[in-house]
Image (tube, rainbow, N blue to C red):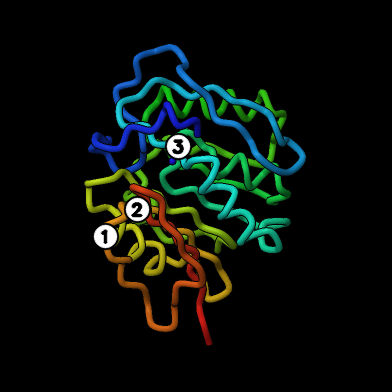
């Protein structure tokens, strides 16, 4: 959803819950945790068409924004892909992370990476993300990472389901990552972009309810 050689923008999975598809088998490339207790640890990323881990540069900016919000937070990674955002959050003190991933091989790799890091405060759900979000939430999340596959128009539907079914409340932080040229999705009244930046191909922002 970090090595630059692993970023492949044009092609994305057609399913609803993965930033990867058509896994070839063996790991190819890696993501590196850039901060926190696990800083410097490198994790394998499967060779998958359209895999687009959030880059080191973007993650560093995001977690600087969230430096006081991540410790103790309950996080949801809606389109987990490489799991880079969740691993980074856990390294920096998040209480728990839920990673949604449809592809079975990639979900297995995410679980193996969690075991390698000896983390027991995260769970990988091998599910279709939009179907999962369509169910009423069992609890609220403090931080939600929403980085859907590009060129599939999943962003607005995902945002709508998050709010409709109670996954976020007015105290949560919502991170969005999408194609640079697109407008932000429509959020409920009172929600505003707290901070945003862009790279050559990506627009990313942090959203918060403003009373």
Within 10 Å of disc 1 (Cα), the crowding (few <14, some 14-19, many 20+) is few
The residue tagged 3 is 53
Q: Residue furthest bottom?
A: 211
Q: For the residue labelled by badge 1, is the local secondary structure a helix, a strand or a loop?
A: loop
Relative image position of residue 144 (x, y in whole percent):
51, 57
In this orientation, which residue lies closer to the viewer: 123 or 92? 92
Q: For the residue labelled by badge 3, is the local secondary structure a helix, a strand or a loop?
A: loop
Q: For the residue labelled by badge 2, is the local secondary structure a helix, a strand or a loop?
A: strand
Image quadrant of residue 122? top right
Q: Label 3 vs label 1: CA separation?
A: 19 Å
Relative image position of residue 125 (x, y in whole percent):
47, 38
The residue tagged 1 is 182
- Relative to 75, say whether 164 is above or below: below
- Relative to 189, say whether 80 is above or below: above
Q: Quadrant of the N terminus?
A: top left
Residue under the point 60% across and 31% down: 32
> Sequence order check: which comes first, mark 3 or mark 1?
3
Q: Is residue 155 left or right of residue 53?
A: left
- Relative to 164, say whether 25 is above or below: above
Within 10 Å of disc 3 (Cα), the crowding (few <14, some 14-19, many 20+) is many
Q: Is residue 164 left or right of residue 72?
A: left
Residue under the point 40% across and 68% down: 163
> Sequence order check: which comes first, mark 3 or mark 2?
3
In this orientation, which residue lies closer to the viewer: 47 or 10? 10
Contact check, label 2 and label 1, Cβ < 8 Å = yes
Within 10 Å of disc 2 (Cα), the crowding (few <14, some 14-19, many 20+) is many
Q: Is residue 69 left or right of residue 206?
A: right
Residue under the point 37% across and 46% down: 129
In this orientation, which residue lies closer to the viewer: 67 or 172? 67
The residue tagged 2 is 178
Q: Label 2 vs label 1: CA separation?
A: 7 Å
């Amino acid at each position: 959803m970090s090595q630059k050689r692993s970023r492949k923008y044009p092609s994305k999975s057609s399913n609803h819950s993965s930033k990867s598809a058509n896994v070839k088998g063996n790991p190819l490339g890696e993501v590196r945790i850039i901060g926190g207790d696990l800083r410097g640890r490198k994790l394998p990323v499967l060779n998958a068409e359209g895999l687009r881990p959030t880059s080191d540069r973007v993650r560093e900016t995001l977690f600087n924004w969230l430096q006081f919000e991540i410790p103790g937070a309950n996080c949801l990674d809606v389109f987990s892909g490489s799991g880079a955002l969740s691993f980074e959050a856990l390294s920096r003190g998040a209480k728990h992370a839920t990673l949604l991933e449809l592809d079975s091989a990639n979900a297995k790799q995410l679980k193996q990476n969690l075991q390698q890091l000896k983390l027991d405060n995260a769970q990988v759900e091998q599910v279709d993300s939009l179907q999962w979000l369509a169910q009423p939430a069992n609890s609220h999340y403090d931080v939600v990472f929403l980085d859907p596959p590009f060129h599939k128009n999943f962003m607005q539907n995902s945002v709508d389901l998050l709010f409709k079914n109670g996954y976020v409340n007015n105290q949560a932080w919502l991170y969005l990552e999408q194609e640079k040229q697109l407008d932000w999705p429509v959020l409920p009244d009172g929600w505003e972009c707290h901070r945003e930046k862009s790279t050559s191909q990506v627009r990313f922002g942090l959203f918060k309810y403003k009373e």
